[in-house]
């Protein structure tokens, strides 16, 4: 079982490193250093995200200002590869340790990572719909 754990850890690290390389080469990391949301007050930020996610009606005057934020949300696909890599690393560590406590902790952490990945994927779909519905 230890060799399987080692294999999963290596596969997870390869996936995570490939995410980082692709993110830096594509410029996605630079995009996320500063976002238009950073300049908004917290309530305005929540209102903007509600509009992009489709939970509030889009004010036509705000549509142009919301586009960069929606584009940034729609471009989060590499984060899913990072999440998958982290889940593989956790699974490998659980197989290496073979203790109930470590296995339960790894399953819980992998579940949280998977839930975060699902939320990212949902936001990507909603942002793409916003961009499609509010084409410039």
Image (spheres, grey):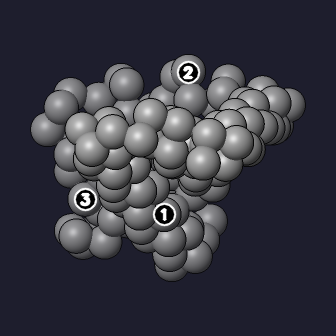
- Residue ID for mark 3: 50
Q: Residue at x 25, y 59 (%)?
A: 50
Q: Quadrant of residue 100?
A: top left
**Counting residues from the N terminus, which is met first, the one under dot 1 or under dot 3?**
3
Q: Nearer the viewer, residue 75 or 20?
A: 20
**Counting residues from the N terminus, which is met first, the one under dot 2 or under dot 1?**
2
80 w.r.t. 51: above or below: above
- Residue ID for mark 1: 121
Secondary-structure class at tag 2: loop
Q: Quadrant of residue 61?
A: bottom left
What's the distance in space between the residues labelled 2 and 3, CA to CA? 22 Å
Q: Position of residue 43 (x, y in %)?
A: 14, 38
Mark whose residue sits in front, 2 or 1: 1
Q: Which mark is residue 33?
A: 2
135 vs 40, left or right, is right
What's the distance in space between the residues labelled 2 and 1, CA to CA? 20 Å
61 vs 13, left or right, is left
Q: Position of residue 48 (x, y in %)?
A: 29, 50
Q: Residues within 10 Å of mark 2 (few under 14, many from 20)?
A: few
Q: Position of residue 103 (x, y in %)?
A: 34, 45
Any part of residue 43 in sight: yes
């Amino acid at each position: 079982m230890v060799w399987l754990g080692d294999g999963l850890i290596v596969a997870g690290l390869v996936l995570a490193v490939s995410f980082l390389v692709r993110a830096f080469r594509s410029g996605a990391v630079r995009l996320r250093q500063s976002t238009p949301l950073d300049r908004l007050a917290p309530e305005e930020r929540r209102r903007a995200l509600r509009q992009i996610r489709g939970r509030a009606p889009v004010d036509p005057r705000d549509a142009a200002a919301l586009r960069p934020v929606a584009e940034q949300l729609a471009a989060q696909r590499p984060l899913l590869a990072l999440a998958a890599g982290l889940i593989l690393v956790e699974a490998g560590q659980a197989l290496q340790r073979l203790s109930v406590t470590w296995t339960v902790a790894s399953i819980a952490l992998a579940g949280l990572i998977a839930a975060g990945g699902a939320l990212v994927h949902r936001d990507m779909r909603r942002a793409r719909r916003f961009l499609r519905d509010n084409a410039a």
